[in-house]
Amino acid sequence: MPLVLTEEQSMLRDSARGLISDKAPVAHLRHLRDSKDETGFSRDLWKAFAEMGFSGLLVPENFGGSGLGFVDAGVVMEEIGRTLMPSPFLSTAVLAVSALSRGGNEAQKSAHLPRIADGSLLAALAIDEGAKHRPLQISLQAVRSGNGFRLNGTKALVVDGHTADLLIVAGRTGGAAGERDGLTLFLVDAKAKGVAIERTVMVDAHNAARIEFSDVEVNADQVLGEVDQGGALLEGVLNIGRGAVASEMVGLSEEVFGRTVTYLKERKQFGKLIGEFQALQHRAAQLYIDIEITRAAVLKALQTLDGDFDHAGAAVSVAKAKAGTTATLAVQEGVQMHGGMGMTDQFDIGFFMKRARVCQELFGDSNYHADQLALMKGY
Amino acid sequence: MSDLETFRRETRAWLEANCPPEMRRPMTSESDTYWGGRNAKFSSEPQRVWFERMRDKGWTVPDWPKEYGGGGLSPAEHKVLREEMAAMGARSPLSSFGIWMLGPALLKYGTEAQKKEHLPKIAAGLIRWCQGYSEPNAGSDLASLQTRAESDGDDYIINGQKIWTSYANYADWIFCLVRTDPAAKKHDGISFILFDMSSKGVSTKPILLISGYSPFCETFFDHVRVPKSHVVGQVNRGWDVAKYLLQHERAMISGMGERGVGRPLGQVAADSVGTDEQGRLDDAMLRSQISTFEVDEAALAAAAERAVDLAKAGQSHPAFSSAMKYYGTELNKRRHEILMSAGGIDALEWESDRSRGGARPRAWLRTKANSIEGGTSEVMLGIVSKRILDLPGA
C-alpha cells in the first residue's frame, strides 16, 4: 500500500476542507467560546456532517454508513485540526462507532449505529479517571446486581460528555487496578438515574465533562462485549482514537506552521523581513521537516489500523508520540515567531497552542507512548 | 491474486532459495560490504555466491532498464523486493557510488553511448567509482571549485585538487566537477566529467580521520588528459548534473543508519546496562532517550517509504531529499551517542579483539561526518528554507 492518499481520499479531503473552512473557521470556535454557548458546537454543522456522510463514515454500510476506513477518518480529523472546529466527530463518529461496531452485538449495533450515521445520536467515551491517561488503572466499580451491574465512580475528560445521549463507560468488574483482565465496557443512558454530569470548561474551549456515577443500574444487555474481557476491546478503540487525534495534530501543526511562515514573509524589523534571518529560517526548516515526518508516521499508523489491526499498536504509539512532540513544537514556535502578537487573544495562534495541549493528553501523551513502545520492544 | 502478489510470492521463494544464511545476518565490519571494481576481492564464499546470483538477475540495480544490466522492475516491484529483502535481513549484494550516485545522473543526462559504456559495468560490479566534488577551498560553497579543465584539441587537460574523495585509493574511475569556463559566474562555468583513475597525472593520499580509519583521500590532478566526449550533459552546465546527483547522494546518506535491522536498540543497551525486575532497562533516563529515539526512527522510516511513494506519484518536491538528509543524519548521530552511552566503559576500548578492534567507538566517530558530507546540516536547512518554504533573502 503506497504511503500516499488515494484519489478517493484526496477527494474526501477536498470536500471536508471545503465545508470546514467555509462554515467553521477559527472564528467559529471563538464565537462559541465568547458567547458561552451551552452546546459547545453547532448542531446545524453536525447535521451538515451527517448529510455529507461524515458522521457515518466508519459505520458499516448495512447499518446506514459508508463503511470507510481509519485513513479516511484521519483525513477528516486533519481538516478539523486545521480550523479547530468543535465537533462530535471524534467522540461519536470515531470512538463510539468503533466501540459499537467492534464490541457490540447485533441488537446494540442496530439500535445505535444508524442513529449515529444520520446524526440523531451523540455518544461519548468515559475512560480516564486520574490526571494522566492510564487505562489499566481504571477503578470505577461495576458490581453485579440483579441481572446486571451497579456502577460507582468518577470519570474525567469525557469528551462531549455533557451533550452525549449515550455514554460508553469503562468499569472494573474484576481484577485490581493495573490489570488488563476484569475491565468491562457498558452502554449507559446519559439520563439514567445516578449519572451526574458536570461540563468542565477547558483551556481549549472544546467540550469535556466530569461524570459521577452513583449506584447507576445497568442491565446485562448494556454490556458491550464480554464481561471482564473489555481490556482488548478498549485498547483497540483507544488505538483508533490515538490515530485520529494524531491526525488532528498533523492538521493543527501544519496550519500553525503555514500561518507562521506567512508572518515571516510579512513582518519587517531592522529594515528586513524577519524571514531573512537565518536564525528563524533554520528553525522554520526544522519544523517543516518534523511535520512532514510526522505526517508519514501518522499515515503509516492509520494504514496499519486499516490493514493489520491487531499489530498496529507500535505504529500507533509512534504516531501519537511523534504528533504530540511536533504539535507542541509547532505551537511554541508559532507563538514565539509571532512575537507579542502571538500572545494576544485577538490573534488565533493561541487557540492552536491550547488545543495542542489537550490533544497531547488525550489517550496518552508523548511520554506515555514512548514508554509503551519500549515495553512492546521488550526493554 | 494480483500480479504484484504473484511477484511477491515468487520473489520471496527465490530469495529463500538463493540468499545464503550468512548473508542474512547484520553486517559487523567493513569487509562485509562488497564494493566491486577491478581489484575487488570477496571476503567470503557466501558473499561471492550472493553477489553473482543477484547480478545475474539484474538485482544489483533492480529498477534500472534491462538493456543497461538492470532488473527492469517497476517502482512497485522494486518496493516489494526491498521489503522482502528487509524482511529476511538480506544484505545488499553490491555497494557502489556508481549505483547510488552516478547511475541515476547518467540515466538522466548521459548520451546513449555513455550509458551503454558505463551502466552495465556498474551493474556487474566491474568498475568502482569515486566522487570528485569537494576541494580544499570549496566545501559547503561547492560551486566555488577551482579544478581547471583546459581545452586541448579533442581533450581537456585537468589540473587541481579534490578532497574528501571517498575511497579514491580503491576507485577505478572518478566522476568529477571541473571548471571549464573561468570567466563565467561560478555556477555557470562547471562541467561534469568522467575519467579513469589510472590516467597519468592522478594521485591519491588517504586522510587519517578521528575514527582511526582513512575512508577519504586527497586526490591530485597534474595535467591529466581526458577526452571531451567524457563530459556528461552540456559543457558548462555541469552544475545541473551535480545538483541532480546530490539529491541521490543525500537520499543515500539519509538512509545510512541501520534502521529496523537487527535487535531493537533498547535490547542492545540491556546487554550491558541490565534490566530491573519488570524487564525494563535498568537506567530510566537512558531508556527514555532510547524510546524517544525509536519513535523518531520509526517515523523517519515511514517518511522514507513515503518519499519513494510520493516520487512515484509525481508529488515530491525535488529538494525534499535535503530534508531527509538532515533528519536521517542527525538521527544516526543520536543512535551512536546512545550506543556509546549504553556501552559505558566497554565502548571505550579501541584495539582489543574483545571490542572487535574498537568497532563501536570507531563507528560512533564515523557518524559525525554524516551531517557534514554531501552538504552540511546547515546547508540542508538553508535549502529547505529557500527552495521549499520560499523564505526571502540570500
Image: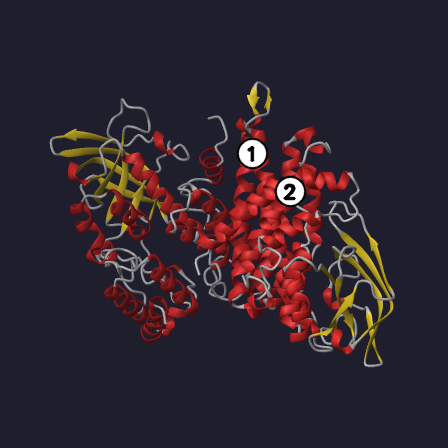
Q: Is residue B60 left or right of residue B388?
A: left
Q: Nearer the viewer, residue A94 or A298?
A: A94
10 Å crowding of disc 2: few (<14), some (14-19), many (20+): many
Q: State the mark number for residue A24.
A: 2
Q: Please, which colouring scheme is shown?
A: secondary structure
Residue B243 drawn at (x, y percent):
34, 39
Taking the spot 37% from the left edge, 69% from the top edge, the residue there is B5
Taking the spot 52% from the left edge, 38% from the top edge, the residue there is A285
Q: Are marks 1 and 2 in contact (CB under 8 Å)?
A: no
What kind of residue is marked 1? Val
Evaluate whether residue B281 shows in this view.
no
What kind of residue is marked 2? Ala
Numbered disc 2: what chain? Answer: A
Q: Nearer the viewer, residue B79 or B86?
A: B79
Q: Nearer the viewer, residue A238 or B245?
A: A238
Taking the spot 67% from the left edge, 30% from the top edge, the residue there is A339
Residue B86 drawn at (x, y percent):
42, 65
Residue B109 drawn at (x, y percent):
25, 42
Numbered disc 1: what chain? Answer: A
Please report whichever mark, 1 or 2, sits nearer to the chain's N-terminal start: 2
Q: Which residue is the site of mark 1? A: A261
Asked which quadrant contains residue B202, the reply is top left
Q: State the mark number for residue A34.
A: none
Evaluate whether residue B165 shows in this view.
yes
Taking the spot 56% from the left edge, 45% from the top edge, the residue there is A17
Q: Quadrant of the N terminus of chain B?
A: bottom left
**Do tags 1 and 2 sit on the same chain?**
yes
Task: State how far apart marks 1 and 2 are (Cα).
Answer: 23 Å
10 Å crowding of disc 1: few (<14), some (14-19), many (20+): many
**Which element type, helix, strand or loop, lies under badge 1?**
helix
